[in-house]
Image (tube, grey):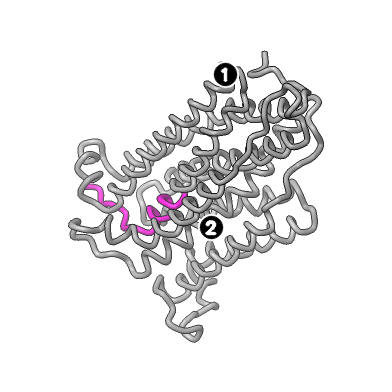
Amino acid sequence: MTLIRPTAEPAGAGGPAEPRPGTGGAVAVLVLVTLGALIPLLGPPAALSGTGEDPPPGTAGIALLRTVLFAALCVPVGELFVQRLAGRLPGAPAARPRSWAPYAAGAGFLAALGLASMVATGNLVPGSPAEIDVGGLYESRDGKLALLEVNAFALAGLLALSGGGRAQWWPMAAVAVAEALRAHPTVEHSPMVGSALTLVHVACSALWVGGLVYALRTLRLWSRLGRPGPGAALLGLYARVAVALLAAITATGLWSTLRRMPPETVLEQLTETAYGRVLLAKVLLVGAVAALALSARHRLRRAADPLSAYVPARAEVVALGVVVAVSGLLTALPVPIRW
């Protein structure tokens, strides 16, 4: 039993109207880009205010670079994911939106290179190229992981430009693994457990965020071709998978939080530490995203025009962009102690 009934009626001839971004789409993109830049840059002082914690060097820069890196990971992963879903739809148009993977790989490469330069200067912001010890990257665990991410994005870009298609899974998987290992140093208690949780969290988040962006782009393209039915069906198929992704994200996020904040100290640390405050903001944002997702799913199931789900789904993209920025900030803040 399918989520909605596809229709082949062309838009403007009695079929569902084509979703048009208009000025609302331009405003949404502007808000997304602005918040994406401001949250990492302006967030550290607000999060650290009154906590008595000292900010690590270059917190704002690291947060911004990690935001770009996370976003660059989401784009190709989401495209590959939704393309696979589209291949399962009978009668779906062969047309696909233009890939953003080459641009994402370029942005990810530059972000990874910037993060590697900071690792090469002892996790400090380099004042000049002479301060960067490239050779030293091979001598530390963090340095090797930083180089892995740089090379992975470079390879992903080459594959995207040469039509490598599904082969892009491998370098993107390498980036996710590197991020999971980086987030849990060997001195941590049970680091491999923490890395496994982070890997699942990052992978599911990339599929959710990137997949929704590409699903909406595909829906809009197919609607312009007069095939809105398969587009709505694709969004419905994505929505069913997104439920499982959200469940995995929630479970791994909760488990990771309890590993870093014992249950008896969670409430206190959520308000008195910078990490806790940003984590609380992220939880509230994810709650808002879930509400938008439920609204879109309800419209797909019950509304007379299933394409009306495009509106809350587009708002969900903007909210997810803010979540990515908050996640980038979270990685740059001091990890709370286990009281």
Residue 59: quarter of image: bottom left
Q: Give the number of the mark in front: 2 or 1.
A: 1
Identified at 67% across, 50% down, the residue is: 170
Residue 69: image tag = 2
Q: Which numbered dot is residue 109?
A: none
Q: What element carries label 2?
A: helix
The percent coordinates of residue 115 (x first, y second) are: 49, 67
Q: Residue furthest top?
A: 1
205 to 146, vertically: above or below: above
Vertical order, 311 against 272 (above or below)? above
Q: Is mark 1 on a helix, strand or loop?
A: loop
Between 254 and 50, the residue placed more toward the observer is 50
In this rendering, is residue 306 above or below 26? above
Which span is picked out in magenta? 324-339
Where's the N terminus, which quadrant?
A: top right
**Spot occupied by residue 232 in the image (x, y as percentages of width and height):** 66, 27
The amino acid at mark 2 is Leu
**Crowding near the residue tagged with mark 1, few <14, some 14–19, many ≥20 C-alpha atoms within 10 Å:** some
Q: Name the residue under label 1.
A: 303
Side of 171 where 270 appears, left or right: left
